[in-house]
């Protein structure tokens, strides 16, 4: 059995996607109780086989419908389908017999330079935990925030810049905005380099 994947949206600006960034991501999830190791009871001796279903986790009821007999299999209500019950008053004091506790786990996620919007980053085995189950994955969906200067079209960036006639003829230098460097100085038309 495997727990469900958890999906989170991560909105980043264009500079972060272009240059790459490391982000701290906090995820709220269920984790196995550290006190009872997911047992739900103070000790293993306090866990008993369910007397209603005999440890199967389900019960079968038989009903007569006219000349036919119908058998219905249902989850055992006494043990919640687990086949085991905890003796009264012997539940773990930390988790209250639930076997899991709520925790907030923080991850350092590295976004590689050039990451595209709608990319998915997968943190394997970091979803909710349950006793006897493999944890699912945390899936981060990368979203791009609107940028005031650039517009993205596929892998291309579109930049609109109004030039005067003098600048367009090459008589003046014009520094275009760039994502790689914060402070640029013009070197020739359309090119820039970082300030020393």
Image (cartoon, grey):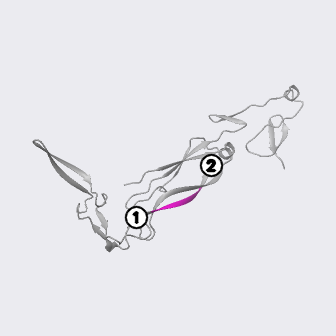
Quadrant the N terminus occupies: bottom left
Please report the residue visible at 63 percent of the width from the left and 53 percent of the height from the top. Answer: 23
User: Which label sits on residue 35?
Assistant: none
Predominant secondary structure in magenta? Answer: strand
First in sequence, mark 2 or 1: give its number: 1
Residue located beneath label 2 in the image: 112
Up-down relation of residue 103 to residue 155 (above or below): below
User: Label 2 neighbourhood size at 10 Å, few (<14), some (14-19), many (20+)?
Assistant: some
Q: List x then y, in percent, for residue 3.
A: 41, 54
Give the secondary structure at mark 1. loop
Does the segment drawn in magenta span residue 186?
A: no
Q: Nearer the viewer, residue 33 or 184?
A: 33
- The answer to whether 130 appears left or right of 122 in the picture is left
- The magenta stretch is 101-108
Q: List x then y, in percent, for residue 186.
A: 84, 39
Q: Nearer the viewer, residue 167 or 132?
A: 132
Give the secondary structure at mark 2. loop
- The answer to whether 132 appears left or right of 107 in the picture is left
- The answer to whether 154 appears left or right of 68 in the picture is right
Instruction: Single out the residue that lies furthest toward the front.
Output: 89
Residue located beneath label 1 in the image: 99
Please report the residue visible at 46 percent of the width from the left and 50 percent of the height from the top. Answer: 5
**Residue 120 figure quarter:** top right
Please report the residue visible at 44 percent of the width from the left and 71 percent of the height from the top. Answer: 35
User: Label 1 neighbourhood size at 10 Å, few (<14), some (14-19), many (20+)?
Assistant: many
Instruction: Single out the residue that lies furthest toward the left.
Output: 67
């Amino acid at each position: 059995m495997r727990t469900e994947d958890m999906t989170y949206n991560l909105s980043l600006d264009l500079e972060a996607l272009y240059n790459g960034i490391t982000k701290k991501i906090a995820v709220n999830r269920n984790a196995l109780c550290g006190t009872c190791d997911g047992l739900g009871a103070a000790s293993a001796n306090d866990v008993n086989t369910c007397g209603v279903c005999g440890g199967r986790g389900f019960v079968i009821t038989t009903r007569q419908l006219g000349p036919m007999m119908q058998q219905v299999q249902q989850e055992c209500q006494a043990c919640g389908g687990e086949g085991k019950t905890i003796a009264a008053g012997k539940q773990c004091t930390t988790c209250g017999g639930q076997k899991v506790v709520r925790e907030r786990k923080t991850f350092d996620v590295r976004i590689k330079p050039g990451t595209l919007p709608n990319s998915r980053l997968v943190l394997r085995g970091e979803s909710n935990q349950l006793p006897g189950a493999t944890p699912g994955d945390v899936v981060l969906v990368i979203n791009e925030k609107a940028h005031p200067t650039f517009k993205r079209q596929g892998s291309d960036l579109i930049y609109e810049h109004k030039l005067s006639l003098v600048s367009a003829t090459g008589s003046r230098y014009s520094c275009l905005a760039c994502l790689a460097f914060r402070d640029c100085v013009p070197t020739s038309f359309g090119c820039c380099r970082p300030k020393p």
